[in-house]
């Protein structure tokens, strides 16, 4: 399983957010990430984020064989 860093932008306050997600080739990428909460303490908006609206980068050294 490869681990990826996923970056997204809150539609409410515009702050960039990021998290890590392990994805195996068998599972494939989801169409969206559900119930993501903005990390901005003044916002905390919860939203679904489409995969196409994210920037995804592999995290080096996290691929398992």
Image (tube, rainbow, N blue to C red):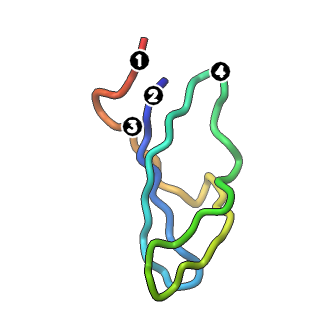
Judge the density around disc 3: few (<14), some (14-19), many (≥20) Cα neighbours within 10 Å: some
Disc marking residue 58: 3
Q: Mark 3 falls on what kind of element?
A: strand
CA gap, disc 1 to disc 4? 14 Å
Badge number at residue 2: 2
Q: Is residue 59 above or below residue 50?
A: above
Pick whichever of labels 3 and 1 is earlier in the sequence: 3
User: Which numbered disc, 4 or 3, marks the residue that appears first in the sequence?
Assistant: 4
Distance Cα–Cα, label 2 vs label 1: 7 Å
> What numbered label is drawn on residue 36?
none
State how far apart marks 2 and 4 are (Cα): 11 Å
Residue plotted at (56% across, 25% down): 24
Q: Are marks 3 and 1 in contact (CB under 8 Å)?
A: no
Q: Secondary structure at mark 4?
A: loop
Which numbered mark, 1 or 4, is in the foreground of this view?
1
For disc 4, the neighbor class at 10 Å (few under 14, some 14 to 19, many from 20) is few
**Total numbered labels placed on residues in the image:** 4
Pointer 2 with pointer 1, Cβ within 8 A = yes
Residue 18 % position (x, y): 43, 59
In the rendered view, does 7 fall on the left or right side of 25?
A: left
């Amino acid at each position: 399983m490869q681990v990826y860093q996923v970056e997204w932008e809150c539609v409410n306050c515009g702050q960039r957010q990021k998290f890590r997600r392990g994805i195996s080739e068998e599972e494939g990428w989801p169409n969206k990430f559900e119930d993501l909460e903005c990390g901005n303490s003044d916002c905390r908006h919860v939203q679904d984020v489409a995969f196409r609206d994210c920037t995804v980068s592999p995290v080096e050294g996290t691929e398992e064989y």
